Amino acid sequence: MKSNSRSYEAIIIGGGPAGMTAGLYTSRSRIHTLLIERGLLGGQMTTTDLIENYPGFPQGITGEELSRLMEEQAKRFGLETVSDEVMEIGLEGDLKRLRTYESTYYCKTLILCTGTEYRKLGAPGEMEFIGKGVSYCSTCDGAFFRDRQIMVVGGGDSALTEALFLTKFAKEVTIIHRRDAFRGTRIYQERARSNPKIKFLLNSVVKEIKGDTVVRSIVVKNVKTGEEKELETEGAFIFVGIAPRTQFLKGLVDMDEAGYILTDAHCETSVKGVFAAGDCRKQLLRQITTAVGDGATAAFAVEKYLEGKE
Ligand SMILES: Cc1cc2nc3c(=O)[nH]c(=O)nc-3n(C[C@H](O)[C@H](O)[C@H](O)COP(=O)(O)OP(=O)(O)OC[C@H]3O[C@@H](n4cnc5c(N)ncnc54)[C@H](O)[C@@H]3O)c2cc1C
């Protein structure tokens, strides 16, 4: 290994529940591990208000608190973390070389836990007004919209749960959905329909988001009639699906057409010694429970791989 670089037995990219669980397991097994996270430890959990389906917390737990507890537990066993972003990965024999904004690292094993991010709508005005009325995170930005009229775009669980959360602040929330029925779980649909602050604009797509220094209106088109109308609003919260954060891994490991990483049952990718865990991996369910399960499996597989190399 190069003398000016830092080297580890295992490096984990991403500090969401998958990465922090993997780090807890490898550190507890005395594997010299570094976890690299470009944002907040906790990943998507940090943007979640209340988590009701993670076992052990019968009254639910906030995403912030669960993130804090996972971090504390992993660090108790000596997990090292660094705030940085991995830009590129190369292979040098059995070693993996990671180039980040700040440094270069080498490791014997790598666990990819990069999660997913919100898909963009692609409408004119969307990028221009991010942070000025366009948002992808109601926990982060909801409080700025107290007593305002806002729009939520999307028809799945995220759109419904975020719209419900936003009624804590906004005076009215209109959900814009391109179909006439929702894809979201029934319990969320029922809660949304019985909430007097939530209105629905179905069979409609967003054509443009307009404003001056902030969002002022949104242009929608009815997909059945073709009619377009401009509606006044002060905020547009967009929840139209997710995409894996794996762009920078293209060419390194095998992926499906959507960019999800392909692994075997031990979370090993097409490259020996490179594992993937959590939402970035191709699988049926993407939740905190599945992410922590993957993190534990990948860490155990790392241990076995390293033992085989001794
Ligand atoms: C609003 C919302 C509500 C949710 N509610 C629930 C719920 O109630 N129950 C539930 O079980 N699940 C819920 N989920 C889903 C759950 O949060 C995810 O399934 C889980 O966080 C996935 O964990 P992960 O570790 O795979 O990825 P993530 O949590 O996405 O973490 C990945 C991390 O990797 C980092 N990263 C990515 N690329 C790089 C790079 N190149 N360099 C360094 N760091 C990088 C990211 O910054 C991120 O912190 C919710 C998600 C959202 C967005």
Image: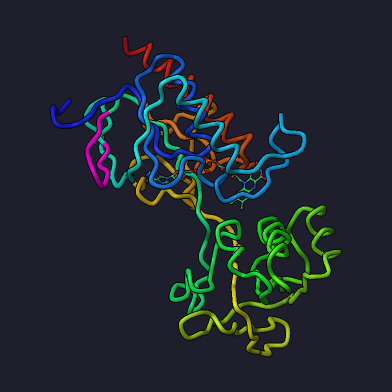
Residue 225, given in percent of the width and then of the height, sits at 72, 87
Q: Is residue 275 left or right of residue 164?
A: left
Start and end of the magenta stretch? Answer: 98-106
73 to 62, vertically: above or below: above
> Which residue is painted at 39% across and 18% down in the image?
305
Callout count: 0
Quadrant, the N terminus: top left
Residue 94, given in percent of the width and then of the height, sits at 27, 25
> Which residue is painted at 58% across and 43% down in the image?
64
144 to 228, vertically: above or below: above
Q: Which is nearer the eye, 113 or 67?
A: 67
Give the prevailing secondary structure in the magenta stretch: strand
Magenta-colored stretch includes residue 104:
yes
Quadrant housing residue 290: top right
Q: Residue furthest left?
A: 3
247 to 24, vertically: above or below: below
Residue 286, given in percent of the width and then of the height, sits at 61, 43
209 to 145, vertically: above or below: below
Q: Residue furthest top?
A: 310
Residue 272 seen by the camera: no
> Which residue is painted at 73% across and 42% down in the image?
52
Quadrant, the C terminus: top left
Magenta-colored stretch includes residue 5:
no
Q: Is residue 44 left or right of residue 306?
A: right
> Which residue is painted at 61% across and 38% down in the image?
288
Quadrant housing residue 168: bottom right
Residue 202 seen by the camera: yes
Colour treatment of the image: rainbow
Residue 50, given in percent of the width and then of the height, sits at 68, 46
